[in-house]
Every structure is written in structure tokens, then in C-alpha cells.
């Protein structure tokens, strides 16, 4: 495998032209956050970390280069008293990678970063730079790197805002209720298998200044330490004594929610930031919102019935319907359910179980996470797949951007 790191769009065009002329296939590479083999190739990997920075900003939209990380984007917007309408709880992925895979947060009424795209520039399979027009955006929003190498992304933005973020323990039924999930600007929860309680995290917009950075840092560190002790420590003990996993999980949910209420007020992207405390493998499924509660309960019941030693909590989030043809939330309000397995452990038993249970509830897999789907399942779940294939053929007629993974899921 060869890795090419172009310094600008001209370098991207040249790399794609060389590949097209030699019959070599190219895969664009982002920050490497994905758990799926989406960017894996044994031919040419095109690494875009040098393509960073703001191209233009008019107060309503910002255009950035593809390799700009979300952290860099947030900093650029904050310096202009602007913000994204949506934010996620990590900021290491690149903008192009986050858009291409449909990366989402947990805003019940605000779409993912892909939904905020108002324009895009890419290099197609002939090595030509093209601007994606409005008519092609829904194909390009979550294109998995299949139609070209994105070099610039334009996003809708809004004036900056503060979010008051609260963490509290709650019964599972309360966490699954529409009153909780739809009642805030941000709402999510974690639930450990073998327990009936959830650790909720919810945020509301407030007309307040962000809290002092020192206080924010202390709050963030405290929550990370608590999560690390509850999750990481429990995993270590559970792997040593698997029979204790149900007891460990019940203790973890109480420990991690030991304070009745914990709050922070800050700029939304800073308040929501929750870097992982331990390494894991992940599988996530996008369910129709109407099926979310039953899907979560059925998965918890299946884990118990199979006696799986699951020391990570399920993560449950929500989002509105998306228009991107290949976005997992395409055409329907969505509930997201993620399962995690500690790095080094076999992820297949839990991943297969989640696929079976959540797939039976109409779930579609997150493209950036582990899943077993092939083209047959994708074709049945995505009504615009044939339209996407037509657009793909126009941008990349010779399949320069194909890969074994894309061949399996898209053909």
C-alpha cells in the first residue's frame, strides 16, 4: 500500500489522475476514528491532513478544507462568535470524514453535520475538481468516499450559544420517554446491562456566558474520572471475574450517577465534549424512533438471556430524519443505539447480537462502526441506493474510489 499526502487540491488531482491512468484504486483517509474498514485499502491511501483551514465565511456559512478537524472548526467559529447548529461529543474527526460517514450527535430536532452541508467541492474519478450543485448534495452528504475525494465543505452556521448540560441518574423507562428524549436541545443516556437505571445527559440553550474555563476543566475532569472508574475499572474486574459483571454494572451506574445532579454551562461544543476514557470497539444502529424503546429493551433482554459479559453501557441517542440518501437516518426520525466491547476482547458475540436484535427493529448500521451487512441488506434498507449508484457512475465511472468494503456494501 502507498500513502500519498497531498499539500493542496492540485496534489489531490494529480494523485487521482495517476491512479486512474495506472488502474490503481484510491481511498481518502480522515482521522482514523472509524471502526469499520471504510478507509482500508491495499492500494493508495490519500491522507488529507494538510488540507486545513477556512476558505470563506460570511456569518451564515463557513467553507473549510476537508482535512480540518472538528476541533479546529469549532475554534474558528468561536473566534467569529459563531457555532454549528449541531455538535458531537468528540472533535478529533476531520470535517470531510464526519460528513462522509454521517457522524451525528443527539439533537432531537437538529440534523447531523451532514445535514448542515450547503456546498461541497471534490475531485472526481478523472482527477477533475468539481463543485457539487444543490441537486447533487443529498447524494454527496454521506457518500462514504465513493464518488470522489472531498477537498472543501461548506456548512450552515448560527450565532454562538451556551448550553447548560446536566447529568443525572434516572429509571430506564423515564430515560426512554418522549418527554425526556424530545424535551431538550440535547438528550442521551447510557444504560448498563443487568440494571434498570440509566445515566442521562441533557442540555438546554441558555442566555448565559460560558462558565470560567478553570471551572469547566475541573467539571470535565471530574466526570471523566468518574466514568473511567465506573466503566474502565468495572471492565478490568469483570474480565477477571465474568460472573460478577451484573453486580459490577449495578454498582457502576450508582457510582457514575452518585451525585444527584451535575451541571456545566459552556459553549455547546465544549460542554458536550466527552473524550473516551477507555479503548473500545463499537457497533451502532439507527432505529426508527417509534421502535427505539422496544429495541433497547429487547437488546438488554437478549444480553441477559445469552449471559454475555457486557461491562460497557449501551449508549442511546436521538436525531431527526435526514435527507442524505445513504445517511442511516434517511427519511425517518431516528433513535441510535450503540454497543461497545473493550479493545482486545472479542467484539463479535455482542456485535452479532446487536445486529440481529436491532436489525429486526428496522435498524440500519452506522457506516463508521462494525456491522455485518452486505449489499442485499443495504439495498433493502435504502430506497435511494439505485439513484446513488447512478450519481456514483457519473462521478467515478471507472471505480477509482472503490474498495473491497464498498464492493461488498454498494457493488
Image (cartoon, rainbow, N blue to C red):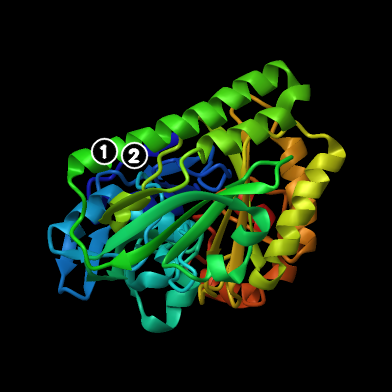
Question: Depth check: 309 or 385 in front?
Answer: 309
Question: Depth check: 96 or 127 in front?
Answer: 96
Mark 1–mark 2 contact, CB under 8 Å?
A: yes
Q: Is residue 55 left or right of residue 123?
A: left
Rendered position, 219 above or below 208 = above
Q: Position of residue 181 (x, y in %)?
A: 55, 66
Q: Position of residue 373 (x, y in %)?
A: 72, 54
Question: Depth check: 356 or 171 in front?
Answer: 171
**Residue at x 25%, y 65% (from the top left corner):** 161
From this viewpoint, which residue is outermost toward the top?
A: 240
Is residue 70 at least partly visible in the picture? Answer: no
Is residue 299 at least partly visible in the picture? Answer: yes
Q: Quadrant of the C terminus?
A: bottom right
Q: Is residue 378 left or right of residue 93?
A: right
Q: Secondary structure at mark 1?
A: helix
Where residue 230 is drawn, which disc sits there?
Answer: none
Question: Depth check: 383 or 43 in front?
Answer: 383
**Residue at x 86%, y 42% (from the top left corner):** 305
Where residue 220 is drawn, which disc sits there?
Answer: 2
Q: Secondary structure at mark 2?
A: helix
Q: Position of residue 302 (x, y in %)?
A: 82, 46
From this viewpoint, which residue is outermost toward the bottom?
A: 135
Q: Position of residue 167 (x, y in %)?
A: 45, 49
**Residue at x 27%, y 51% (from the top left corner):** 68
Q: Calculate the distance from the C-alpha at mark 1 to the C-alpha at mark 2.
A: 5 Å
**Residue at x 73%, y 37% (from the top left corner):** 348
Pointer 1 residue: 217
Amino acid at each position: 500500500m502507498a500513502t500519498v499526502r497531498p499539500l493542496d487540491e492540485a496534489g489531490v488531482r494529480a494523485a487521482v489522475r495517476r491512479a486512474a491512468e495506472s488502474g490503481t484504486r484510491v481511498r481518502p483517509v480522515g482521522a482514523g476514528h472509524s471502526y469499520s474498514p471504510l478507509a482500508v485499502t491495499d492500494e493508495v491511501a490519500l491522507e488529507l491532513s494538510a488540507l486545513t483551514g477556512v476558505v470563506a465565511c460570511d456569518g451564515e456559512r463557513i467553507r473549510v478544507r476537508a482535512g480540518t478537524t472538528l476541533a479546529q472548526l469549532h475554534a474558528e467559529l468561536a473566534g467569529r462568535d459563531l457555532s454549528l447548529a449541531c455538535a458531537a461529543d468528540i472533535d478529533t474527526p476531520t470535517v470531510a470524514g464526519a460528513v462522509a460517514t454521517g457522524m451525528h450527535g443527539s439533537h432531537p430536532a437538529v440534523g447531523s453535520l451532514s445535514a448542515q452541508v450547503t456546498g461541497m467541492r471534490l475531485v472526481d474519478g478523472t482527477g477533475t475538481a468539481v463543485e457539487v450543485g444543490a441537486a447533487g448534495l443529498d447524494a454527496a452528504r454521506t457518500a462514504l468516499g465513493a464518488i470522489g475525494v472531498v477537498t472543501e465543505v461548506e456548512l450552515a452556521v448560527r450565532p454562538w450559544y451556551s448550553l447548560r448540560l446536566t447529568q443525572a441518574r434516572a429509571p430506564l423507562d423515564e430515560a426512554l420517554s418522549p418527554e425526556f428524549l424530545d424535551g431538550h436541545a440535547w438528550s442521551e443516556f447510557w444504560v448498563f446491562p443487568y440494571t434498570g437505571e440509566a445515566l442521562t445527559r441533557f442540555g438546554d440553550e441558555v442566555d448565559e456566558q460560558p462558565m470560567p474555563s478553570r471551572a469547566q476543566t475541573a467539571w470535565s475532569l471530574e466526570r471523566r474520572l468518574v466514568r473511567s472508574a465506573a466503566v474502565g475499572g468495572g471492565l478490568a474486574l469483570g474480565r477477571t471475574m465474568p460472573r460478577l459483571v451484573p453486580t459490577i454494572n449495578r454498582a457502576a451506574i450508582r457510582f457514575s450517577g452518585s451525585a444527584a445532579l451535575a451541571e456545566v454551562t459552556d459553549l455547546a461544543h465544549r460542554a458536550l465534549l466527552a473524550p473516551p476514557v477507555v479503548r473500545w470497539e463499537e457497533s451502532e444502529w439507527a432505529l426508527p424512533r417509534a421502535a427505539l424503546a422496544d429495541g433497547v429493551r429487547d437488546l438488554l433482554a437478549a444480553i441477559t438471556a445469552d449471559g454475555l459479559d457486557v461491562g460497557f453501557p449501551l449508549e442511546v441517542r436521538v436525531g431527526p430524519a435526514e435527507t442524505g440518501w445513504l445517511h442511516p437516518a434517511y427519511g425517518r426520525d431516528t433513535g441510535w443505539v450503540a454497543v461497545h466491547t473493550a479493545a482486545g476482547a472479542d467484539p463479535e458475540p455482542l456485535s452479532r447480537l446487536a445486529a440481529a436484535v436491532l436489525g429486526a427493529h428496522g435498524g440500519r448500521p452506522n457506516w463508521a462502526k462494525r456491522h455485518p451487512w452486505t449489499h442485499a441488506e443495504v439495498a433493502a434498507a435504502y430506497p435511494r441506493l439505485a439513484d446513488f449508484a447512478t450519481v456514483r457512475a457519473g462521478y467515478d465511472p471507472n471505480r477509482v474510489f472503490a474498495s473491497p468494503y464498498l464492493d461488498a456494501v454498494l457493488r
